[in-house]
Image: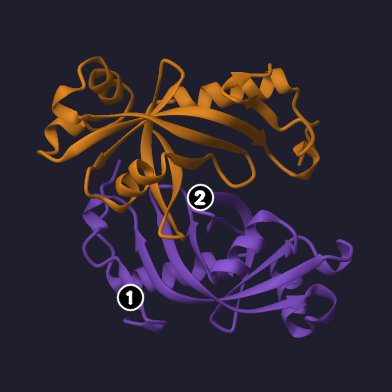
Chain colours: A orange, B purple
Amino acid sequence: MVREEPRSRERRKADTLAKLTAPVADGWVASAGDGEPYLVPLSLAWLDERVVLALAADSRTARNIVARGRARLGLGPTRDVVMIDALLDVVIPAAEAGAIADGYAAQSDWDPRAAGPGYVFLVLAPDRIQAWREADEIPGRLLMRGGTWLV
Amino acid sequence: MVREEPRSRERRKADTLAKLTAPVADGWVASAGDGEPYLVPLSLAWLDERVVLALAADSRTARNIVARGRARLGLGPTRDVVMIDALLDVVIPAAEAGAIADGYAAQSDWDPRAAGPGYVFLVLAPDRIQAWREADEIPGRLLMRGGTWLV
């Protein structure tokens, strides 16, 4: 196996954006409620520098994120990850989401507007983004801090 | 693409055990502390029906799990997942872990005993295990409840 050099931070940003904008981009979404961790795999869209999730409003993940205002997302296989700490920006009922719903349906393989009532879009603003593959990429993994790209 | 039938629960249990016992098994480990979700990819071992993690004792994941007594883990690509809600059984300093350390080193690609002082093994007892691929496998996804296999 060819052992790759650690990627530059510019390359990691490009790889991160490629993951976020890929058709049918899935991620692991961690949230917390009453001190208990929760975690599910979900499809996401990357629209206007925001992570957009679509969920049943009464799902545990939606309730946790709305209550606590934050989520932590992981994308990629476990040895090529993007980690995103994100803050809840806005919650929009699916039927009223307009361009966000169009953008989500264009990137994803389902349209939450067709999933029945009770679905919402959660628009999350990334606050911190890290990207690494293995231990040799731990240095330089911080790509965004305080919502601002560092590269 | 051949569209597979939803797997039987017996088949899902076998697939779950295959994931848990695979060489260099990685998972996504969600924990919570102060109401904030945390999430990292980690290697795990499956020893004696327990999930074993190895971490720096002062890492955020170790501190959260020790404080709250629980974690939620996800294994697999996002469309072939195993979800495990687990309760902390015991914490053992790496140097004192004996058979657990041997078992972890045999399954993983690193030996926490060689990682310096301050590493611990967290032994987690699965309480609830679910396995599904896509929406058609949501029914029947519960394989373990209250620490007991249902299949």
CA neighbours of label 1 inside 10 A, class few (<14), some (14 to 19), many (20+): few
Residue position for label 1: B10
Write the residue at 46% across / 45% down: A28
Can I make out residue B24 in this image? no
The kind of residue on which mark 1 rests is: Glu
- Is B90 situated left or right of A99 in this image? right
**Residue B88 appears at what percent x and percent y?**
57, 75
Label 1 and label 2: CA atoms lie apart by 33 Å
Write the residue at 16% across / 23% down: A96
Can I make out residue B106 in this image? yes
| Host chain of mark 2 | B
**Residue A63 appears at what percent x and percent y?**
30, 48
Judged from this view, the residue extending furthest toward the left is A116
Write down the quadrant of residue A8 in the picture. top right
Label 2 secondary element: strand
The kind of residue on which mark 2 rests is: Pro
Write the residue at 71% across / 72% down: B121
Label 1 secondary element: helix
| Host chain of mark 1 | B
